[in-house]
Amino acid sequence: MNKKLLGLAAFCMMGLSAGAWAADAATADEVIGKVKEASAAVKAGGDASLADFNDPKGKWAWKDSYVFVLDCTAGVVAAHPNEKVRAMKVADLKAKNGKDLGPALCAAAAKGPNGGWVEYMWTKPGAEGNFRKVSYMLPAGKYRVGAGVYGDTPVAALEAKTK
């Protein structure tokens, strides 16, 4: 009997943990808002604004997402809350399934003033394995600004939000 109760308690705790994590998941609307705000900040502040995006506990990191900045002309990650990614070559950025990611992110931002979305496989905070992630990219002067959201919303539906 105790084993059954223990099993039930463990099952309930897993459900509560998943629910708590889901509440901490960024939404597509939050990503769009943050990327637009970040793009304006980078346009206004230029190089001096980049340090703010490197802080994993700062304004540009929230829930399970964060804003990152690419310099696609120089081919480097200009700002990122993970110091291991910061200053990497854009060409070296790969999705977790091995597909080229960096050039796709730059191309999405170059689609026009409303930018674009890129779908890829990535790790998710607090979870094992690789998951579908879609990042929204916008131009910001000489830089490209982006942030991503996990989930199964079709890219076409996300693009409709940013037209």
Image: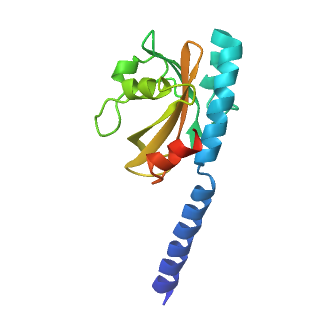
Determine whether, in the image, residue 71 is placed left or right of residue 16: left
Report whether residue 80 is seen.
no
Residue at x 61%, y 39% (from the top left corner): 32
In the image, 107 versus 34, the foreground residue is 107
158, 37: nearer the viewer: 158
Q: Quadrant of residue 103?
A: top left
Query: Is residue 85 something one can see in this rendering?
Result: yes
Q: Position of residue 138 (x, y in %)?
A: 56, 27
What x and y, as percent, mark residue 41? 70, 21
Q: Quadrant of residue 45?
A: top right
Residue 122, horizontal then vertical, whole percent: 41, 41
The quadrant of the picture occupied by the C terminus is: top right
Q: How is the structure coloured here?
A: rainbow
Residue drawn at x 59%, y 63% as measured from the top left: 19
Relative to 112, residue 11 above or below: below
Q: Quadrant of residue 147?
A: top right
Q: Residue at x 58, y 35 (%)?
A: 66
Tell me what residue is drawn at x 52 percent, y 67 percent. Answer: 14
Front-most of 32 and 6? 32
Where residue 67 sits in the image (x, y, percent)? Answer: 59, 31
Among all residues in the image, which is located at the extreme bottom?
A: 1
